[in-house]
Amino acid sequence: MDERDIRLLKAIADLETGSPEKLHEETDIPVSTIHYRLNNLREAGIIENDLYDIDVEEVGLGVTVLVEILADYSGSHHDFEEKILDVEGVTQAYFTMGETDFIVVAHLSGREMVERLITDFETIEEVQRTNSTFVISTLRDSHRVLQNYSLETLLDELLDDEA
């Protein structure tokens, strides 16, 4: 990636759009160049999709629960993780180091769904214990990681060094 790619990715994150015209207004990169670079970034796997973001609270899934899972499983964690991913409502799941084996995030509609989620985890034979945390308010929930960095930091950290 070069400086233009990084500027383009930062603008996409900040503006929350892939509109070449809006990206041109933000970066002064010509629209034709933006089209070309967006295609290259997609082919390289850096840009994964063009999905619309959905406000889960507006949809009715505004209760966020974080669940730590402590498990006792034999074999690879890969054999066990599918059971976790099959639980309805799990939107994010992480295999972790330390005392906790897995952390999952679920967006639910209310108390009944929270109870069903925990019950579903408890019925998995390998699950020894869960520890659930109810999110009172969301301070930041961004899938646009680049929004949380300044352009200067991104350029310093990600720009390919020319030797």
Image (cartoon, rainbow, N blue to C red):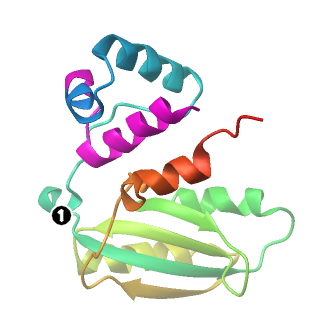
Is residue 96 among the parts visible in the rendering?
yes
Residue at image point 68% right, 77% down: 101
76 to the left or right of 22: right
Residue at image point 32% right, 66% down: 107
* Residue 116 is inside the magenta segment: no
Residue 125: give x, y in percent of width and height. Answer: 67, 75
Q: Residues within 10 Å of mark 1 (few under 14, many from 20)?
A: few
Which picture quadrant has residue 163?
top right
Residue 29: give x, y in percent of width and height. Answer: 33, 23
Residue 45: give x, y in percent of width and height. Answer: 57, 30
Which picture quadrant has residue 55?
bottom left
Magenta stretch: give its range. Answer: 1-21
163 to the left or right of 31: right
Vertical placement of 158 versus 39: above or below? below
The residue labelled by disc 1 is 57
Q: Which residue occupies the extreme left position in the image?
A: 58
Residue at image point 43% right, 22% down: 38
Chief SS of the magenta region:
helix
Q: Which residue occupies the extreme front position in the image?
A: 163
Vertical placement of 35 versus 140: above or below? above
Observer-nearest of 57 and 148 = 148
Observer-nearest of 103 and 143 = 143
* Residue 20 is inside the magenta segment: yes
Residue at image point 37% right, 77% down: 65
48 to the left or right of 79: left
Q: Which residue occupies the extreme top position in the image?
A: 32
Residue 28: give x, y in percent of width and height. Answer: 28, 27
Quarter of the image with the N terminus in it: top right
Q: How many marks?
A: 1
Vertical placement of 36 versus 11: above or below? above
Q: Amino acid at mark 1?
A: Glu
